[in-house]
Image: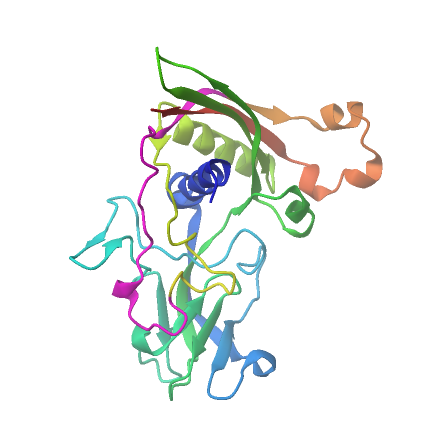
Amino acid sequence: MNRLRQEDASLYLYIKDIVLSDYIEKQEWVPLNYVDSVSIGDTKVYEIDDYFEPSPKTRGRGLVYFDDLTNECLVNTTTYSGTPEQSDRIKVYTAAGVEIEDLQYVVDYIDCRIVTDQLITPAYIDYHWYYVSVLDEWGDVKTTPPPAIVVDLDSTVKTGFQLGHGIKSIRRCTLHIFGSDPAERNDIRELLHDGLYLKSCPLYSFPEGVVLDSDGLFNGRKGNMDKAATPFDRTTVSGVSRMQFENIESRNIRMPDIISRGMTDTMLSSINAYRAVVTFDVIVYQE
């Protein structure tokens, strides 16, 4: 994984899991429905009964895969080191209300599904989910209901910062905010600004890849029922500083501003009604 992608993914995790932690929502006693079309042989798939908007299944949301990171709960043993998959954010129950041990299933965090090959019948679920969609692709905004944020690392400057070796990397970043109403937009804008002001975050190297695999499972969990054996590796990139945030500015975008830039009425959908941006520099020093 190259440096730009490492910075992008590290910033994405910081915003989604730390800055927006107040926007993690909890649902209790939600029915699970058996999905015959994707169940194969002994492997059975159950998905949450999706009855409200925005849906946890929409792009950039999903179920929460870490427990509360406020105190950076880590697993540190002679064999494994990192942040383990959640153990308290998701609870699955039988129809009789008996909790099913999490060793008997895995979670598809993207599609909000429970997958099992055991002799169990999941019927209900308590779960935490990301209310704000965090995206790294502009095209996804069209199909994702607000609130949503697009993370855009859009330019780079590299300069020397000392005599001899050493590089100061400056990347200009913009967070594009799409709210459901003015109050929500303003709250998210202020939360993002405060989460960046005088703050920094680690630059991870992702030696084992990002947190979730493409199938929505926690990295390394396919065919492995031991959560302790598959923590997210938080090894940082050697020889560089933490990612520091400077020159933070935020503002709302008025509808006349969009019109003046030549957009047609057909582009002024509800997704554009309550917009804001937060701009800042991401500074990394490399020896």
Which image quadrant for residue 6? top left
Identify whether 261 is placed above or below 100. above
Query: Is 238 in the magenta?
Result: yes
Which image quadrant for residue 229? bottom left
State the scheme by which the image is colored.
rainbow
Region in magenta: 221-248
In the image, 280 versus 190, the foreground residue is 280
In the image, 259 versus 209, the foreground residue is 209
Q: Residue furthest front?
A: 164
Q: Position of residue 273 (x, y in %)?
A: 69, 36
Along the horizontal axis of the image, is 275 left or right of 39? right
In the image, 36 versus 240, the foreground residue is 240
Identify whether 68 is placed above or below 7. below
**Residue at 44% across, 58% down:** 212
Along the horizontal axis of the image, is 51 left or right of 243? right
Q: Residue furthest left?
A: 78
**Residue at 82% across, 27% down:** 262
Instruction: Give the quarter of the figure containing the C terminus.
Output: top left
Query: Is 242 in the magenta?
Result: yes
Magenta span: chief secondary structure: loop
Q: Position of residue 274 (x, y in %)?
A: 64, 35
Which image quadrant for residue 193? top left
**Residue at 84% across, 34% down:** 264
Q: Position of residue 82 (x, y in %)?
A: 27, 52
Q: Position of residue 74 (x, y in %)?
A: 23, 51
